[in-house]
Amino acid sequence: MTAPTPDTTEATVLRIWTDLGLPATSVDDDFFVLGGQSLTLVAFLARIQETMGVEVPVDTLFETDLTVAAAARAITQAQLDGLAPDDLAAVMAELDGMSDDEIAALLAQAE
């Protein structure tokens, strides 16, 4: 069985963890198993804020095992939480008006 291809946010997390000296290769890799420590976590959060423009609450990262996939979900949730209700409604309305093919094309562009 082959490992799933990481989405854009997961790929960003993988790259940042690797840059921080954590040899992550899979979305299932665990931060602490790879050797991550509290200072590394602070550096990771700073890099997320710098590269993605979002603050992820540290306690969110401890709700489950801190894997690449879990970190990516926390980042995505923080991005959604940061949207104003009107902005989120506008995005949802735009998506509702798109066909499945248009949405698939948009997602392919994001990768």
Image: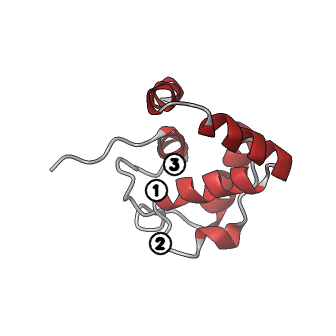
Say whether disc 1 or disc 3 marks the residue closer to the N-terminus: 3
| Separation of residues labelled 2 and 3 (CA atoms) | 15 Å
Q: Disc 1 designates what residue? A: 69
The residue that appears at 65% across and 57% down in the rendered structure is: 77
| Residue 20, percent from left and from top | 55, 47
Outermost residue to the left: 1
One can see residue 20 in this view: yes
86 horizontally vs 81: left or right = right
The residue that appears at 55% across and 57% down in the rendered structure is: 73
Tell us which disc is closer to us: 1 or 3.
1
Amino acid at the residue labelled 2: Asp
Callout 2 crowding tier (Cα within 10 Å): few <14, some 14–19, many ≥20 = some
Q: Nearer the viewer, residue 24 or 76?
A: 76
Amino acid at the residue labelled 1: Ala
User: Which label sits on residue 17?
Assistant: 3
Tell us which disc is closer to us: 2 or 3.
2
Amino acid at the residue labelled 3: Trp
Q: Disc 2 designates what residue? A: 65
The residue that appears at 35% across and 50% down in the rendered structure is: 26
